[in-house]
Amino acid sequence: MSKFHLDIDFSKIDFASLETEEDFQREAKTLLPKALVKLGESVGEKTWEELQQKLQASGSKLKSSPSEKRRFMQETGRTYQRNASNREKQELEEYIVEQLRQHKL
């Protein structure tokens, strides 16, 4: 079971061209930057929800708009992409290869 829960867009992938391990690795490296942003946005969304719940529980007045939430998620995604460790990148790349193999079947 993977720790990642991402919907990766494979619509532009030519699965017929994925034959060797190198082909899968190359495609995963191409998809990695967007996947990192998506993962960061997912973390940002969870963080946003938790912050809103804490504010509500403390009796603070909520004043968050959908555009503020989206901006927060986008910034968190970009930050995550820039600051992800090599280990995180490698694990996500391996996950992408695994997903590519499953979609090719």
Image: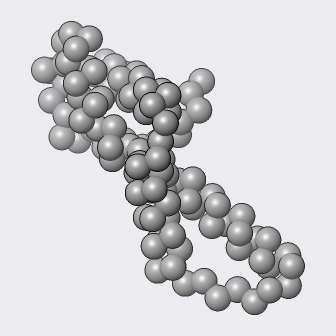
Left or right, 20 with respect to 60, comes to: left
Name above or below for residue 62 compared with residue 104: below
Residue 55 x %, y %: 77, 77
**Quadrant of the drawing holding the N terminus:** top right
Name above or below for residue 91 compared with residue 38: above
Name above or below for residue 68 compared with residue 82: below
- Residue 48, picture quadrant: bottom right
Left or right, 102 with respect to 31, comes to: right
Q: In the image as oriented, which residue stretches furthest toward the top?
A: 20
Residue 95 x %, y %: 44, 27
* Residue 38 seen in this snapshot: no
Q: Residue at x 49, y 60 (%)?
A: 76
Q: Residue at x 45, y 73 (%)?
A: 71
Name above or below for residue 63 compared with residue 87: below
Residue 73 x %, y %: 49, 64
> How many numbered circles are shown?
0
* Residue 46 seen in this snapshot: yes
Q: Residue at x 24, y 35 (%)?
A: 30
Residue 68 x %, y %: 51, 79
- Residue 96, picture quadrant: top left
Residue nearest the observer in this picture, 94 or 90:
90
